[in-house]
Image: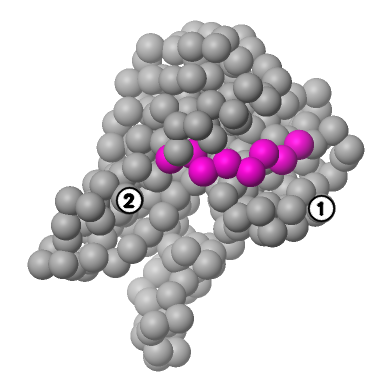
Amino acid sequence: MIPLGLEGKTILVTGASSGIGAACALECSRSGANVVITGRNGERLQQTMDALDGNRNKQVLCDLTLEDELNLLIDQLPKLDGIVLCAGINQTLPLAFLSRKKVDKIFNTNFFSQVELLRLLIKNKLLNEGASIVAMSSIGGTASFTLGAAAYGASKAALLSWMKSAARELAPKVRVNCIAPGQVNTPMNVSSNITEEQYQAYQDSIPMKRFGEPEEIAYLAVFLLSDAAKWIAGSVMTIDGGTTL
């Protein structure tokens, strides 16, 4: 049998209050993992918690960009077999409207908070040998450069580069990989500020003729967390319906 399950593993999912993070938490629990979820929105985080399978899951309300809250999260964590780093924000900012403050806000969430979390996990020896780290980058940081996405794409490119270095440094005891999704039907990615015609045209430009669904990204995350992926390290897996072809 292919070892695709996560039975007996403890997995931390950040950004679990909505979108891809919530889907990853749900699919990890369905695959047998004990899941620790964290996010900034307490009401939505509770909704994710209520949807998880099993009774050994845990939620910790936390803004990863705040040092005190991050340290409190670290204090409450058990030893981990896997992490899915999904916390992130996006904002369309044409170059003329960029400012250091706006760029810092995006980088603090998408890059620095993820890096600091992983640093603290390593420092406090909270990763079991054989643990798997999965970071959510984006095709916006690798191959798809759209108007107004310079700050977002740069933050995701930085995350990808940092994770590749971490993969080299932490091997062979810990595996690190990135997922680079395309456009996914999440509250962050699907804007209500575009017309139905624009929305349809965007989908039609994708070879698969639709946006992805959060659970389709989560399935890949579960695979990378599982023992079926034990020899995959430092990879960037694109899942975008053919957008970057």
83 or 225, nearer to the observer? 83
Is tag 1's residue or tag 2's residue first in the polypeptide sequence?
Answer: 1
Q: Is residue 60 magenta?
A: yes
SS for dot 2? helix
In the displayed structure, does residue 241 sit left or right of residue 14? left
Q: Indicate the quadrant containing the N terminus: top left, top right, bottom left or bottom right.
A: top right
**Mark-to-mark CA distance, 1 and 2:** 29 Å
SS for dot 1? helix
Instruction: Determine the residue positioned at 44% across, 89% down.
Output: 196
In the displayed structure, does residue 55 sit left or right of residue 138? right
Disc 1: CA contacts within 10 A as few (<14), some (14-19) or many (>=20) = few
Rendered view: 96 above or below 239: below
Q: Residue 239: percent from the left, percent from the top?
A: 47, 51
Disc 2: CA contacts within 10 A as few (<14), some (14-19) or many (>=20) = many
Outermost residue on the right side: it is 55
Q: Residue 144: percent from the left, percent from the top?
A: 27, 57
Rendered view: 58 above or below 39: above
Instruction: Determine the residue positioned at 84% across, 45% down.
Output: 53
Magenta stretch, residue numbers: 58-65
67 or 49, nearer to the observer? 67
Instruction: Determine the residue positioned at 70% across, 35% down.
Output: 36
Rendered view: 41 above or below 67: below
Outermost residue on the front side: it is 68
Q: Which residue is mark 2?
A: 106
Instruction: Give the residue type at disc 2.
Output: Ile
